Amino acid sequence: KAMFAVLAIFVSPGKGTQVWKKNGAIYEGDWKSGKRDGYGTLSLPDQETGKYKRAYSGWWKGDKKCVSGSHHALGCGPG
């Protein structure tokens, strides 16, 4: 399992932002037990411009993206 250095994490009850120092990725959204869980957005910096681009916006469960077809298996989505 890969380990990443965390530059900052700001978490209020259920909501927060994390910035990964290694690659500059930013996650903004829901958290549960220190993991991405609920709805959130992962953005990555463009290597040429440095501007952030949305890489994924959607549901997360147990720190994993809920991709098409996995919603029922992982219990993703609202309710």
Image (cartoon, rainbow, N blue to C red):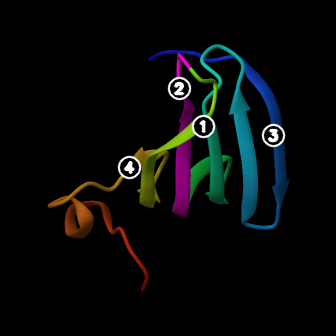
Distance from disc 2 to disc 3, alpha carbons, whole Å, reads 21 Å
Q: Residue at x 83, y 33 (%)?
A: 8
Residue designated by label 4: 65
Q: Is residue 35 magenta?
A: no
Amino acid type of disc 1? Tyr
Dot 1: few (<14), some (14–19), or many (≥20) neighbours within 10 Å?
Answer: some
Left or right of residue 44, residue 7 in this image? right
The 10 Å Cα crowd at callout 4, few under 14, some 14 to 19, many 20 or more, is many
At label 2, the amino acid type is Asp
The image's mark for residue 46 is: 2
Q: Describe residue 39's horizontal placement relative to residue 24 as left or right.
A: left
Q: In the image, which is nearer the foreground, mark 1 or mark 4?
A: 1
- Can you give x and y, in whole percent of width and height, for residue 10 in the image? 85, 47
Q: Which residues are magenta?
A: 39-48
Q: Which badge, 4 or 2, is on the more N-terminal residue?
A: 2
* Residue type, numbered disc 4: Lys
Question: Would you name the residue on which mark 1 appears?
Answer: 52
Going by the numbered disc 3, the residue's amino acid type is Ile
- Ranked by sequence position, the earlier of labels 1 and 4 is 1
Residue at disc 2, secondary structure: loop
